Amino acid sequence: MNCVKVFGTEVSGSKFLIDLLKLNTSGARILDHEMGYKHGIPLDVKEIQQWFKTEKRPDQELMRIMRSLGKGELHPYPVIIIKNPYLWYKNMSNHRGKKNFNFDREFEIYNSSYNIYKDLIENSKKRYGGLYAKGLYVKYEDILKHPASEISKISTHCSLRMKLDKDFVMPTHINAREKKFYLEGPPWKIDEIKLINIQTRVDWNLMEYYGYELINVEKAYNNSHYIRRISK
């Protein structure tokens, strides 16, 4: 028995990743909000057991997973999804409503969450009672650009099987227009003041770990053909 637990902040693309894994892989239970909130912090075994008590109708597979966790026989693979902080702001401000978006509060959550996820990736054996297997992270933008290869990378790491008997399947909620917008590069229709607000609140040492860097705001606005990607 095997299982994968996806983590990521709100509007990070976690649903997109979960759908891709369910559509194109087999050999493991892909956990959404099972065993804890996917947008929250990882839980240890005791916390997961407390969560399980709130499940009204757990299926047989989930019950087997819980028994294996309790015996220390199963170690879920954590897969972290991250979206670059500029696009994350764009989506999150729409999600919250621009009038309700608080830069300090929202980016404190963003930085804190990905610090916790970084620690989970690097120290899985030392954290949460050694519950989790070695994790990895994927970038939302990379999945959009190369979905099959990114899912194949996750499959190899997490001991999943790609469904090779059929063509790779994309979720229907991602369209060509949205994909083009995400991949076209800065400034993503974000005004200059908001770009600076983002840049002063993001932990860029942390973002370097995930492969992101500051954009040159002046260059992004002075050159309409500016095509440098936020991803390295």
Image (spheres, rainbow, N blue to C red):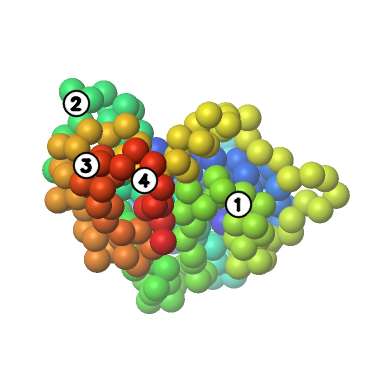
Q: Earlier in the sequence, mark 4 or mark 2?
A: 2
Q: Quadrant of the N terminus?
A: bottom right
Judging by the rendered image, the residue that carries numbered circle 2 is 100
In the rendered view, does 183 fall on the left or right side of 87? right
Callout 4 crowding tier (Cα within 10 Å): few <14, some 14–19, many ≥20: some
x and y percent of residue 99 in the render?
18, 23
Q: Provide the secondary structure element on which disc 3 rests.
A: helix
Q: Are marks 2 and 1 in contact (CB under 8 Å)?
A: no
Judging by the rendered image, the residue that carries numbered circle 4 is 226
Q: Are marks 2 and 3 in contact (CB under 8 Å)?
A: no
Q: Earlier in the sequence, mark 2 or mark 1?
A: 2
Judging by the rendered image, the residue that carries numbered circle 1 is 146
In this view of the protein, which residue sits in the foreground, 70 or 24? 24
Q: Nearer the viewer, mark 2 or mark 3?
A: 3
Q: Amino acid at mark 1?
A: His
Q: Amino acid at mark 4?
A: Tyr
Q: Which residue, as the protein is rendered here, is positioned at the far right? A: 165
Q: Earlier in the sequence, mark 3 or mark 1?
A: 1
